[in-house]
Image (tube, rainbow, N blue to C red):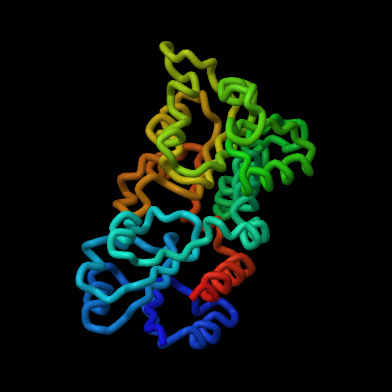
Amino acid sequence: MRKIIVTTPVSHLPGAIELLNTKGDITLAETINKKDLRKILLKKDLDTIICNPNQQTYKIDKELLEGTNIKTINTCSTGLNHIDVDYCNDLNIEIQHHKNDLKLLNQLPSTSELAFGLMLSLLRRIPQSQKHVSEYKWDYTQFVGRQVKDLTIGIIGYGRLGKMMYNFCRAFGANVVVYDPYKINKEMPLEYLITHCDVISLHVHVTDETKYMLNKHSLGLTTTSSFGSVKGDCYIINTSRGEIVNEADIVEGLKSGRITGYATDVVEDEFGDLTKSPIIKAMNEGENIVVTPHVGGMTIEGQTKAYEWSFNKL
């Protein structure tokens, strides 16, 4: 029988604990830190870790695993940046994940739904309007926004989530263009999307090619840029990873008025000191920024399906 430690919240999901109890001997440590987890792994004869990157503030690496009996890491995610994959491979530790589970992933629109919601929050200034009313004020003139219909919306990345976002925007009557040199529209340069779109929505994985792909040069915010400039009333949505954009450049674009709003579910150093995040700092200083704490996939329906799929790999 497997001896499993669960290091991510699952107790709130209907049937999760009952299903886990059929897979092995369960230790629940849903909010544990790295130091305490290390102690438990050394003390107990545990062989399996169940995890998820969203709540995890540390990396599963040599520092955590050396000298333990862990044989399997089961992560309810497609991303693996919370795990030292090379180290695990060297030790023949199996990593179970959702990267290739297309049948499951096509049933999970939660992150794209959030991207659309973040876009509406920016376009209609919903957070600012709510704060205004919470102060017992009632002046709509400060919050005249934009409607989705007839806007030009650019989707960067036409994978599963990008396609869903495309369909949501089309359903609202937007003109939608796509940049993804590996899937469609190879003839459309990124520059066209940046210079023509009212909204840019990011749906790509972090690679050497995509890291900091939106920066002051690609957005045309410098006089030396070979790119044309981003539209002065452009909004940027990021539900991918914080490092897809250069966050300092985004803030500079907002302060100069060259970018109108930025909404994100991710920041570059989510595991670090959030008080040093240029995005969160600028939001608190009044820039038109909306930040959510990596909640893209965090719906009851989505989590229940994804964790059930994960647990059944054990």
Q: Is residue 114 left or right of residue 71?
A: right
Q: Quick check: 205 above or below 213?
A: below
Q: Give the camera-side residue of 148 and 186.
A: 186
Can you tell which quarter of the image residue 83 is in? bottom left
Q: Give the camera-side residue of 171 and 231.
A: 171
Q: Position of residue 66 (x, y in %)?
A: 21, 67
Q: Position of residue 216 (x, y in %)?
A: 43, 24
Q: Residue at x 59, y 72 (%)?
A: 304
Q: Position of residue 12 (x, y in %)?
A: 53, 77
How many dots with numbers? 0
Q: Give the camera-side residue of 256 and 242.
A: 242
Q: Is residue 227 left or right of residue 152?
A: left
Q: Give the camera-side residue of 244 and 101.
A: 101
- Viewport quadrant of the N terminus: bottom left
Q: Quick check: 103 above or below 260?
A: below
Q: Position of residue 88 (x, y in %)?
A: 32, 61
Residue 22 visible to the viewer: yes
Residue 137 visible to the viewer: no
Q: Residue at x 51, y 16 (%)?
A: 227
Can you tell which quarter of the image residue 57 is in? bottom left
Q: Residue at x 47, y 13 (%)?
A: 226
Q: Quick check: 142 above or below 79?
A: above
Q: Is residue 53 left or right of residue 197?
A: left
Q: Residue at x 51, y 24 (%)?
A: 258
Can you tell which quarter of the image residue 208 is in? top left
